[in-house]
Amino acid sequence: AVVSTQSTGVEEKYSNLQDEAAGKTKKLQRINQMYKSAKAEIADMRVEHERRVEGLVEDIKQLTKEMNLQELLINYTIPPEFQELIEKVLLYSCHNTTDRQTDRQTDRQCHIPILTNAYPLKC
């Protein structure tokens, strides 16, 4: 009795049941090895992903710490009313620069006026 299988896309013919069992056992071992290899690769990818996520979390913590320090310094050195004035000037300057820019997509520089009269520097 000739038996054929097409599970891997390649037709195999066996002359008896022992040959079929041996052939399928080899194929099963190959598939099992491929499965173990893929499983190990997924585990490696998970470890790498976790390492990257931990790195990003540490970066976020560090950047948050630096931002809080900068905010503290700004709040300590610049009075709140001048902070509001600076924010308004920056917003105004960034939104009203069409006459100074030829192409908004390529030239995104904001022209910020000097505020020395409104907020004299202390030396």
Image (spheres, rainbow, N blue to C red):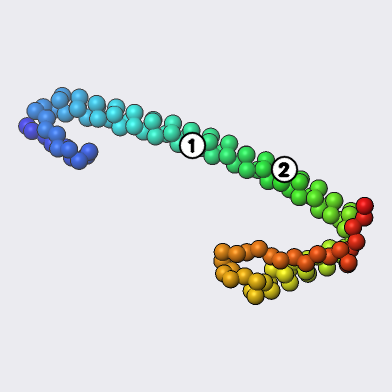
- Frontmost of labels 2 and 1 is 2
Whether residue 84 is visible here, answered yes or no, is: no
**Amino acid under disc 1:** Met
Picture layout, residue 82 above or below residue 66: below
Query: x%, y% of residue 84?
Result: 83, 66
Please name whichever residue, 55 or 89, is drawn nearer the observer in this view of the structure: 89
- 7 lies left or right of 81: left
Whether residue 83 is visible here, answered yes or no, is: yes
Q: Residues within 10 Å of mark 2 (few under 14, many from 20)?
A: few
- 48 lies left or right of 85: left
Label annotation for residue 62: 2
x 88%, y 67%: residue: 118
Instruction: Point out the residue furthest to the right here.
Output: 123
The residue carrying mark 1 is 45
Instruction: Point out the residue furthest to the left here.
Output: 1
- 46 lies left or right of 113: left
- The mark that comes first in sequence, 2 or 1, is 1
Q: Secondary structure at mark 2?
A: helix
Q: Secondary structure at mark 1?
A: helix
Query: x%, y% of residue 73?
Result: 85, 51
Task: State the CA–CA distance, disc 2 to disc 1.
Answer: 26 Å
x 9%, y 28%: residue: 15
Verify CB contact (< 8 Å) between mark 2 and mark 1: no
**Amino acid under disc 2:** Gln
Please name whichever residue, 16 or 89, is drawn nearer the observer in this view of the structure: 89
x 65%, y 75%: residue: 99
x 89%, y 53%: residue: 76
Label annotation for residue 72: none
